[in-house]
């Protein structure tokens, strides 16, 4: 039922743990933290949860989620439903999620701020791999009391980048000059049904206003992609990342995607960066990080058999012991039986 279960904990830190495939029945959860009457709760730091029915459930817990990786699955008997589910309560249960990646297919959503949830997301990455199937929703706010999203990316959803109702509150994706959003939302979906930001309770309403100024929509956003009560101007007109452009063109040409190691993003970085690669066929994969002296500092994928397709891994700037590494140049190397390539990246503190 649970990979890790922490109930009524006081100042607990769950760091650097890995939980795989807790999806044998509905409700199976990688990590669940419920604080109840605990004032301090539990912190989740640099944990990895793979292919679970629910990745992380955080309930009434004020401890942060930082530098974690949650991967979804579309091939298991019971597919992944939600990456991170936050079932909050009244103050002081305020969840912060930072530097965290939720990637892969979820039949529901990547992040779910549930009834009374109070949450703040910053420097996070929510993505479905391009192709089919896509997760229906990137971020959902259902009767949440508070949801702030800052400097985060939502890529390749099927229906809604951000879905909310205004029964209790609407999400804040940035509007004030001193606290802008600077989020990036992008999908290569065709058709007219998908939305960037949508309020399911809105209909033809004009208030309340969902704060969504100063975000990157990767296109001039037509009004049909939003519910009428979304304040989305000004938008920041930038092009899709080069990786996404290349993938779009390859899909248009109906060509197979070859094995490839992409440049990390961002680069330079502090303290986290995303490492992406694509597999043309199932292969045994090693993904490792080395310092300038050629010494291995972190093993990201330890010789595992992975299916064909794109992958994204977050490096939190720490070694295998969980200690932060120093500023400088590092190399990440992708090695399979048919491929070997490394790329350089810079950590600047």
Image (cartoon, rainbow, N blue to C red):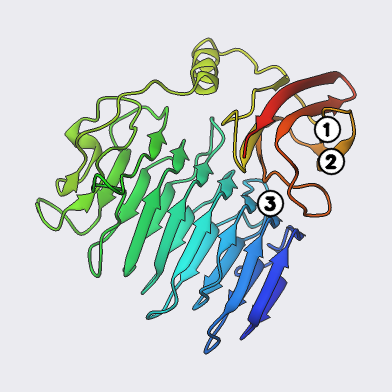
Q: Is residue 2 visible?
A: no
On the image, which quarter does residue 40 sit in? bottom right
53 left or right of 324? left
Q: Is residue 7 above or below residue 152?
A: below
Residue sitting at x 20%, y 59%: 201
* Quadrant assignment for the C terminus: top right
Residue 156 or residue 265, whichever sits in front: 265
Give neighbour class at mark 3: few <14, some 14-19, many 20+ (Cα, 10 Å). some
Q: Is residue 317 visible?
A: yes
Secondary structure under badge 2? strand
Residue 96 or residue 69, whichever sits in front: 96
Residue sitting at x 76%, y 25%: 281
Residue that mark 3 sits on: 76
Q: Mark 2 or mark 1, which is nearer the start of the sequence? A: 1
Q: Mark 2 or mark 3, which is nearer the start of the sequence? A: 3
Give neighbour class at mark 2: few <14, some 14-19, many 20+ (Cα, 10 Å). many
Residue that mark 1 sits on: 290
Q: CA distance from mark 1 to mark 3?
A: 34 Å
* Quadrant assignment for the N terminus: bottom right
Q: Position of residue 331 (x, y in %)?
A: 77, 27
In the current view of this chain or complex, which residue is farthest to the bottom? 37
Residue sitting at x 67%, y 29%: 346
Residue that mark 2 sits on: 297
Contact (Cβ within 8 Å) of mark 1 with mark 2: yes
Q: CA distance from mark 1 to mark 2?
A: 5 Å
Secondary structure under badge 3? loop
Q: Position of residue 277 (x, y in %)?
A: 69, 28
Secondary structure under badge 1? strand
Q: Is residue 48 above or below residue 183?
A: below
Q: Can you tell which mark lies on residue 126?
A: none
Q: Mark 3 or mark 1, which is nearer the start of the sequence? A: 3
């Amino acid at each position: 039922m649970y990979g890790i279960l922490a109930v009524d904990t006081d100042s607990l830190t769950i760091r650097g743990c890995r939980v795989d495939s807790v999806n044998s029945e509905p409700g199976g959860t990688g990590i669940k933290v419920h604080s109840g009457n605990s004032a301090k709760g539990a912190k989740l730091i640099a944990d990895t949860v793979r292919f679970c029915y629910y990745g992380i459930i955080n309930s009434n817990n004020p401890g942060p989620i930082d530098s974690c990786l949650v991967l979804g699955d579309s091939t298991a008997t019971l597919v992944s439903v939600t990456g991170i589910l936050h079932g909050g309560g009244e103050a002081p249960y305020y969840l912060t999620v930072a530097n965290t990646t939720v990637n892969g297919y979820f039949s529901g959503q990547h992040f779910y701020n549930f009834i009374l949830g109070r949450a703040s997301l910053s420097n996070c990455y929510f993505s479905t791999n391009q192709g089919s199937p896509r997760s229906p929703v990137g971020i959902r706010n259902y009767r949440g009391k508070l949801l702030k999203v800052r400097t985060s990316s939502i890529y390749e959803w099927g229906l809604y980048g951000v879905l909310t109702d205004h029964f209790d509150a609407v999400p804040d994706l940035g509007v004030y000059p001193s606290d802008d959003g600077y989020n990036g939302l992008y999908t290569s979906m065709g058709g007219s049904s998908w939305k960037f930001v949508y309020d399911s309770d809105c209909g033809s309403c004009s208030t309340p206003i969902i704060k969504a100024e100063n975000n990157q929509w990767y296109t001039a956003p037509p009004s049909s992609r939003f519910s009428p009560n979304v304040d989305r101007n000004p938008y920041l007109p930038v092009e899709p990342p080069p990786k996404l452009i290349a993938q779009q063109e390859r899909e248009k040409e109906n060509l197979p995607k070859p094995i490839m190691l992409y440049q990390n993003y961002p680069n330079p970085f502090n303290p986290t960066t995303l490492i992406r690669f694509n597999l043309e066929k199932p292969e045994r994969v090693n993904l490792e990080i080395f310092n300038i002296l050629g010494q291995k500092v972190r093993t990201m994928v330890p010789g595992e058999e992975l299916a064909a397709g794109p992958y994204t891994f977050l490096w939190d700037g720490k070694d295998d012991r969980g200690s932060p590494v120093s500023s400088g140049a590092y190399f990440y190397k992708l090695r399979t039986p048919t491929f070997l390539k490394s790329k350089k990246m810079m950590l600047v503190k």
